[in-house]
Amino acid sequence: MTLTDPATAADHADGRTAADVRLGASVDRSIRLISTGKQTGSTCAPELADGPWTFDLGPAGYGPGASMGDVIPAGAPRQGGLPAEYRTASNDELHERIRAAKATLGDRVVVLGHFYQRDEVVQHADFTGDSFQLANAALTRPDAEAIVFCGVHFMAETADLLSRPEQAVILPNLAAGCSMADMADESSVEECWEQLAEVYGDLDAVDADGRVPVIPVTYMNSSAALKGFVGRHGGIVCTSSNARTVLERAFEQGQRVLFFPDQHLGRNTAKAMGVPLEQMPMWNPRKPLGGSTAAELADARVILWHGFCSVHKRFTVEQIEAARRDHPGVQVIVHPECPMPVVDAADAAGSTDFIVKAIAAAPAGSTFAIGTEINLVQRLAAEHPEHTIFCLDPVVCPCSTMYRIHPGYLAWVLEELVAGRVVNRIQVADDVAAPARLALERMLAAKPPATVGTAPVPSTRRSDAIRRPVEPATAESRPNDAGTAGSGA
């Protein structure tokens, strides 16, 4: 799918201007209108209309939005105060300053924008896509001295792992973390590993088939420290689009898998592979043996970490039923981070890139209910007026930490670069980076089959909805003026 940069695009064939598209895609505008009673609807946190700098100086937390109820770990990165000139500037002034700074820096900087970023930030991105594609996209700009990653902390870490040592990876707001990534910390996973050794014995010993007792697999949405843990213990990283391929590889080398941090991606993927639910015990790090018995762990095929995405946890089967009732013929596509009952009730499940491509390939007049982050959904709806596209969750509730990135922070870090200063640099320690890269290299070596994923087929009633294979997403990322990236987490 092509998501042309609204800041530079020509007017659309349907008569809408680039500004019209940008306005329609703006979740920030929707929240402001809802909060002031000028638009119908509801939001989970009216304070989202305030600048993120309001929360940077308050008590530690993920901020308003989907993760506002999650407990942030002690020592999580904090962002200092944003200079007043960026807090008080109008949006128009900030956009002009960003464009001017980028023009001055030229090829010395590349700006990456995740699908879930607010549209006011995405319009300035040189590449748009998911976390792993964006990290790879930066590799196409080897002359860039700085990589500004408009996403969250683990994404910037991955970019640092894959970039050249002399390139500075910058996160505009250090408070842009990820509650799901934080649900599996290195010490808890190390403790889990030790307890599993008590159950399985020597974790390096191989059976008659050459398999070790357990292989660790971490989702891309995890810290560099966990990627390093996985690398040290013969494990591998996965994305939402290659999770099945990765699990197949892991089962070739291990009797079972320890999957973290997202239980839902692990469960949905393993279930689709035929693993019985009773062989997928949950590991709660606050309980001995994760809350299971030694016998249950001995029988396990996939041990699921007790983690989840607070955005995708909001989607429900009841929302799908309402969408089908109110929109006959609707095609429901959800992200595999959604709970299993939601994935089972949907017409298709797939990564962000899968969702983008499915909508682009659909015939005009299609209706889609999408179960993923509202910024991507609203942007797709604005970019595809030929379709009816809406978010399954009727409450506007963006990712708390993605929303911590604001044009004010982007203008600040870019103008600091113009002045010769690097702020908010993300660097992974060498002793962590080496095994983490090894885990990523193993993932890249695991080749997917010729066709993966499922795509929706438009229908007029529920019984007609079927699934069909689609071409796998690639690891290619394209500039915003030519298209968006596609393939993973």
Image: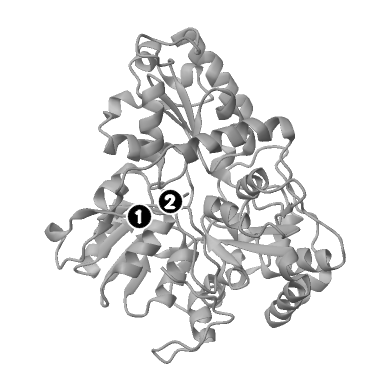
What type is the residue that disc 2 sits on? His
As rendered, which of 224 and 297 lies closer to the eye? Answer: 224
Q: Is residue 295 left or right of residue 400?
A: left
- Rendering coords of residue 105 (x, y %): 77, 70
Question: Within 10 Å of the Cα at label 2, are there few (<14), some (14-19), or many (20+) other Cα atoms?
Answer: many
Q: Residue at 62% x, 56% y: name it.
A: 138
As rendered, which of 72 and 304 lies closer to the eye? Answer: 304
Q: Residue at 48% x, 46% y: name it.
A: 309
Q: Which residue is mark 1?
A: 334
Question: In the displayed image of the protein, which residue is found farthest to the bottom?
Answer: 15
Q: Residue at 43% x, 51% y: name it.
A: 312
* Image: 449 above or below 287: below
Question: Within 10 Å of the Cα at label 1, are there few (<14), some (14-19), or many (20+) other Cα atoms?
Answer: many
Element under label 2?
helix
Residues tagged 1 and 2 counted as in contact (Cβ below 8 A): yes
- Rendering coords of residue 425 (x, y %): 76, 51
Q: Is residue 475 left or right of residue 293?
A: right
- Rendering coords of residue 417 (x, y %): 81, 64
